[in-house]
């Protein structure tokens, strides 16, 4: 049977600051992110299966990604651990959703973080094909499985 790609789109709002950056993005600022997740697999061939003909129900893909990725990042502030100090401690006390990561929260690194999260959630018969993350309407980072084999 043929393998089919299935894509789901997500939106979230997130703020970040780039530690030690030499431009305006070193300051806390936010983006309206658009995330595209594409999986690939064979449609279910068992006509008795309730998901017959689907690689994965779009609703199931949505629930799989929404909580651990989209809801986790939505309306949060993401900063690099090296930025820790009195200011970061104050931010963590002032706001509920401050995530401190072991990586610089660039669009590129956020893509890799999202890829790792999603790959841990997929069953063995479905592969992650690509992740595309728009930081602005005209700027995005993307990951393709074929580039990483």
Image (tube, rainbow, N blue to C red):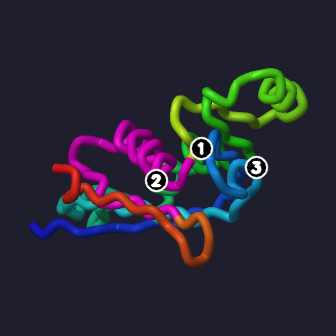
Q: Residue at x 90, y 31 (%)?
A: 94
Mark 2 secondary-structure assignment: helix
Q: Which residue is mark 1?
A: 67
Mark 3, secondary structure of its residue: loop
> Badge 1: how crowded within 10 Å, few (<14), some, or many (20+)?
few
Residue lying farthest to the front in this orientation: 22
Label 1 sits on a secondary structure element that is: helix
Closer to the chain start, of discs 1 and 2, is: 1
Q: Which residue is the site of mark 3?
A: 27
Residue 74: say if magenta.
no
Gap in angstroms between the C-alphas marked 1 and 3: 28 Å
The residue wearing badge 2 is 108
What residue is rendered at 64% in x and 46% in y?
18
Query: The magenta stretch spans which residues?
Result: 106-133
Across and down, in percent, residue 127 comes to: 26, 52
Of the two numbered discs 1 and 3 on the same chain, state the one appearing first in sequence. Answer: 3
- Which of labels 1 and 3 is toward the front? 3
Tell whether label 3 touches label 1 (CB within 8 Å). Answer: no
């Amino acid at each position: 049977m043929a393998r089919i790609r299935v894509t789901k789109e997500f939106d979230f709002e997130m703020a970040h600051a780039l530690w030690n950056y030499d431009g305006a993005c070193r300051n806390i600022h936010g983006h309206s992110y658009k995330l595209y997740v594409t999986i690939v697999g064979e449609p279910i061939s068992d006509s008795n299966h309730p998901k017959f003909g689907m690689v994965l129900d779009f609703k199931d893909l949505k629930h799989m990604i929404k909580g651990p990725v989209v809801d986790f990042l939505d309306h949060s502030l993401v900063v690099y651990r090296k930025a820790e100090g009195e200011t970061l401690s104050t931010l963590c006390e002032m706001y509920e959703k401050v995530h401190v990561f072991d990586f610089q929260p660039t669009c590129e690194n956020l893509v890799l973080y999202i890829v790792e999260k999603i790959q841990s959630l997929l069953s063995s018969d479905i592969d992650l094909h690509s992740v595309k993350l728009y930081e602005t309407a005209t700027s995005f980072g993307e990951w393709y499985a074929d580039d990483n084999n």
